[in-house]
Amino acid sequence: MAAPLAPPELSTCHPATKGSPPDMTHCCPPYSQAHIVDYDFPRTPLRVRRPAHEVKDDPEYIEKYTEAVRKMKELPSDDPWNFYQQALVHCAYCNGAYFQKGYPDVTLQVHTSWHFLAWHRYYLHFFERILGKLIKDDTFALPYWNFDAKEGMTIPEIFTSDPNSPLYNDNRNKDHYYPAIVDYRYAYKCGTPPCGSNQTGDELVQANMSYMRSTFKNSLQLPELFMGDPLRAGEPDSSKGTGGLESIHNAIHQFVGPADTEYHTDMGNFATAARDCMFYRLHANVDRLWHLYTNFRGNRVEFDEPDWLESSYIFYELQSDFTGRGTIL
C-alpha cells in the first residue's frame, strides 16, 4: 500500500478550515489549473546566507533586503510572486486546502513527518529566488535567525526596530522582543504554567544549547528522531511523529507569535505564519541545522526509500532570466 506523496490536484483546492482563523481560510492559488513541469535547478551563482544578527551592521545588505520585500509586497494582490500570495502557499499545504491525490478524505499536510524539512527547503528556495529577481540580483540570499548560538538567541532587531519597515510585523509578542531570550520549550498550551523551561538569562541559554545538542546527538543513528516519521500517500498526518528539530521550531513559532489571540495569528498559526518575514528567517536556520545534521552523519542518506525520494510538491517557478513572469512547477 506504500506510495510517495503526490502533488495535489489544483482544481480541487477548497477553503482551508483545519485550524485557520475563520476569516483566513481562502488559501488557494490564483489559478485552478497549470502546466506542471519537473523542476531543473538553475545554473546560478551560489547564494550564501548570513546570520541575521550580523547583517544588521551591513547597511548595503539591509537596503537590498528591505527593497526586495517591499517590491514583493507591492505586486498586484493576485500576482503569484506577491508576498501574501506566497504566504498562502504555506496555508494551502498546512491547513487542509488540499486532499492527498487519490485520497479524498485525507488532508495534505507537510508538517509532523519527514516531509517537513524537504518541503520547507523548496519553499525557501523559490521565495529566495523571487526576492533576487525583483532586485535583479541572482546572488541574493536570505539571512537566517541563528537561534542556536548565544548571540543569536533573541529576536533579530532588524525585524523589530522600525515599524515602517516592510520587515516589520505588528502581530508578534512584543514582550519577547530583545533582550528576551528564545525558549526552545515555549508553548501556548501546557499542563501547568509557565509554558517553557522556567529559566532566564545564561541558565536559559545553557538549557537551549543542551537541548539542541541532545536533539542532534540522540538522533544521529535514527533520522526519524530528527526529521520526523515517514508519511506515505494515504496516511493521515495525525498518525505520524514530529521530529526533534520541528519540535524546537514549533516552540520558536509560538515564542514569536501573539499569545493573547484565540487563533494565535501570523507566526502562531500555520495559515498565517508566512505573512511575517520572521518565518523565512526561522526556516532558513532550520534548513541550515538540517544541513549540519547531514554533515554530522557523514553525508549519509537519511532515507533511501522510494516513498521519500519520489515524493513531489508544487511551487511557483520562475524563468531563467530576470524578465520572465514564471511558470509553475
Image (cartoon, rainbow, N blue to C red):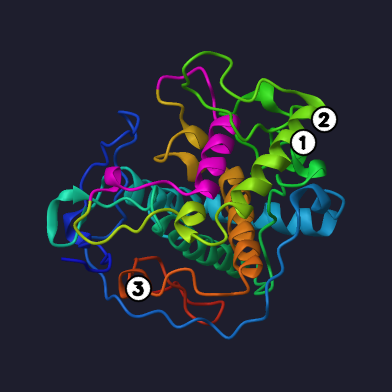
Residue identifier under label 1: 206
Q: In the image shown, does 236 or 61 lie closer to the viewer?
A: 236
Q: Earlier in the sequence, mark 3 or mark 2?
A: 2
Q: Residue furthest top?
A: 192
Residue 167 visible, this angle: no
Tell me which residue sits at (22%, 66%) in the image: 33
Quick check: 64 left or right of 326?
Answer: right
Locate the C terminus and report the quarter of the image it occupies.
Answer: bottom left
Question: 10 Å neighbourhood of mark 3: few (<14), some, or many (≥20)?
Answer: few
Q: In the image shown, does 126 or 227 lie closer to the viewer?
A: 227
On screen, 128 above or below 286? below
Residue identifier under label 2: 202
Queried whether the magenta region covers residue 252, the answer comes back as yes
Whole-percent x, y for residue 237 in the image: 29, 48
Residue identifier under label 3: 305
Please give the range of residues in magenta: 236-262
Q: Residue furthest right?
A: 57
Q: CA distance from mark 3 to mark 2?
A: 42 Å
Whole-percent x, y for residue 225 in the image: 48, 52
Q: Amino acid at mark 2?
A: Asp
Callout 1: helix, strand or loop? helix
Locate the N terminus and report the quarter of the image it occupies.
Answer: bottom left
Q: CA distance from mark 2 to mark 1?
A: 6 Å
Callout 2: helix, strand or loop? helix
Callout 3: helix, strand or loop? loop
Whole-percent x, y for residue 243 in the image: 47, 49
